[in-house]
Image: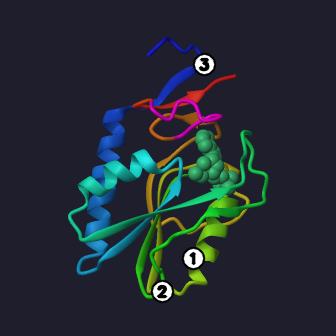
């Protein structure tokens, strides 16, 4: 990678891999005998989800949902809408939502409400990262990779204006 002075490694790929293993163990322990429907929130969760499902020794299905709230900015607009919904019926399913990061909580609480209305058998949330200091809406996180400080992070699927998703570590983006 071309040297990027504004990027500082916050979480290394090795530590990410260990967290993915731990999360897979926790999910397997809790979800024995279930056929999970994993719903990844596009686009940020796709790298995490790809690694996580390959560690999960459970029968599962994969769906994606696309929401919009951020546009190209770093702050949530506070208005969330579904840009592309799930095709697989959610009613009666054991749903596990896979998110990249919970920041204010506005996006994911909208999504959990939206999915709850479709009457799943169970609804849980797994997020790679959490920025608890920024929370504006309470969010029940069932499976958490990392709690991160109040800094903008990129890499491992997370972007800034669509850049840096391909980086293997998680970095802070300094101004
Ligand atoms: P929230 O609605 O404020 O919780 O925003 C959540 C969404 O904003 C996440 O799904 C991310 O896509 C994006 N986001 C929030 N913080 C960051 C960050 O530090 N880096 C990259 N994306 C972020
Ligand atoms: Mg996201």
Q: Is residue 124 left or right of residue 151?
A: left
The residue lying toward the viewer, choosing from 85 and 127, is 85
Residue reaching furthest left?
Answer: 57
The residue lying toward the viewer, choosing from 78 and 102, is 78
Q: Quadrant of residue 108?
A: bottom right
Q: Which residue is mark 2?
A: 91
- Give the dominant element type of the magenta stretch: helix, strand or loop: loop
How crowded is the residue under tag 2: few (<14 C-alpha within 10 Å), some, or many (20+)? some
Determine if the magenta segment contains residue 155.
Answer: no
Residue at x 64% of width, y 67% of height:
109
The residue lying toward the viewer, choosing from 172 and 122, is 122
Q: Which residue is mark 1?
A: 115
Circles 3 and 1: CB distance less than 8 Å? Answer: no
Is residue 2 shown above or below 93?
above
Q: Position of residue 112 (x, y in %)?
A: 59, 72
Is residue 20 shown above or below 171?
below
Residue at x 71% of width, y 48% of height:
70
Give the structural element (helix, strand or loop) at label 2.
loop
Q: Position of residue 121 (x, y in %)?
A: 44, 86
> If you read the primary sequence from the N terminus, does the residue marked by circle 3 or circle 1 appear first?
3
The quadrant the C terminus occupies is: top right
How crowded is the residue under tag 1: few (<14 C-alpha within 10 Å), some, or many (20+)? some
The quadrant the N terminus occupies is: top left
Is residue 65 shown above or below 17?
below
Residue at x 45% of width, y 32% of height:
166
> If you read the primary sequence from the N terminus, does the residue marked by circle 3 or circle 2 appear first?
3
Q: Distance from label 3 to label 2 (Cα)? A: 45 Å
Q: Which residues are magenta?
A: 158-166
Give the structural element (helix, strand or loop) at label 3.
loop
Q: Which residue is mark 3?
A: 6
Circles 2 and 1: CB distance less than 8 Å? Answer: no
Q: Distance from label 2 to label 1 (Cα)? A: 9 Å
């Amino acid at each position: 990678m071309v040297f990027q002075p504004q990027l500082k490694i916050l979480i290394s790929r090795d530590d990410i891999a260990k967290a993915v293993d731990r999360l897979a163990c926790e999910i397997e322990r809790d979800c024995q005998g279930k056929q999970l429907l994993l719903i990844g929130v596009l686009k940020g969760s796709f790298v995490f989800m790809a690694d996580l499902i390959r560690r999960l020794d459970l029968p599962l299905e994969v769906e994606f949902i696309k929401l919009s709230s951020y546009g190209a900015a770093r702050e949530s607009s506070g208005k969330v809408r579904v840009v592309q919904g799930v095709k697989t019926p959610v009613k009666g399913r054991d749903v596990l939502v896979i998110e990249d990061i919970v920041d204010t909580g506005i996006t994911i609480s909208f999504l959990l409400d939206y999915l709850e209305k479709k009457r799943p058998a169970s609804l849980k949330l797994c997020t790679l990262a959490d920025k608890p200091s920024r929370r504006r809406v309470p969010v029940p996180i069932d499976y958490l990779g990392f709690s991160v400080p109040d800094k903008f992070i990129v890499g491992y699927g997370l972007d800034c204006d669509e850049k840096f998703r391909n980086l293997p570590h998680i970095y802070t983006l300094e101004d």
